[in-house]
Image (cartoon, grey):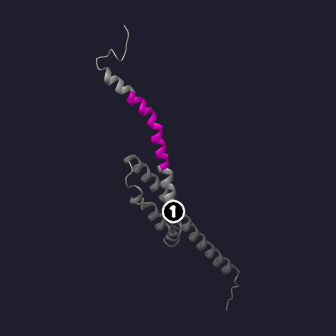
Amino acid sequence: MRCELSSFKYGGLGSFLAIFMALLILAVPILAQQAENAALLAQEQARRDVSGTTWFIIGFFLGIVGYALAYLIVPNPPSSTLVGKSPEYVATYSDAYREEGKRIQTSKALIGCLVNTGIWVALYALVIAAAATTPTYYY
């Protein structure tokens, strides 16, 4: 008993499925490359759009509250870059943009918070050192 697609009752369907699977196997790497390109483009755009200086200042002046804001506020990509793109591209681009933007926000706000804390610790140390070296006069 030989098994041939042409002898199958639905031979056209079998041929269609074979061709479809072959095209799908060829298309998957192309789609994966497009998704990778979308992620790289989104990360570049996020680096241009999200102001690290602004988040440093927010972290510096608001401290841990500024860091919490940087963590809670989610940056969104500009909609003009997503017009006419496939849903998969939009999803990949948006996720990568948000992830990179949030990484920038939180790291810069944390650095600002730590710099502020370091300055205050240094000032307290100077005050304590000055108080320790000041002679005490008893009347």
**Is residue 46 part of the magenta span, yes or no?**
no
Which three-letter amino acid code belongs to the residue tagged 1? Arg
Residue farthest along the left direction in this orientation: 9
Task: Give how far across and how far down residue 90 sits, in percent.
Answer: 40, 51
Q: Chief secondary structure of the magenta span?
A: helix
Identity of the residue drawn at 51% across and 68% down = 59
* Magenta span of residues: 19-37
Identity of the residue drawn at 44% across and 37% down = 27
Task: Give how far across and how far down residue 28 sits, in percent.
Answer: 45, 37
* Residue 106 as seen in the image, left or right of residue 80: right
Viewer-proximal residue among 124 and 78: 78
Task: Give how far across and how far down residue 134 sits, in percent.
Answer: 69, 83
- Figure quadrant of the C terminus: bottom right
Q: Tag 1, which secondary structure?
A: helix
Which residue is labeled 1 in the image? 48
Task: Give how far across and how far down residue 88 sits, in percent.
Answer: 39, 46
**Is residue 32 part of the magenta span, yes or no?**
yes
Q: Quadrant of residue 113?
A: bottom right
Q: Is residue 57 above or below residue 19?
A: below
Q: Is residue 19 above or below residue 93?
A: above
* Residue 113 as seen in the image, left or right of residue 7: right
Residue farthest along the bottom direction in this orientation: 139
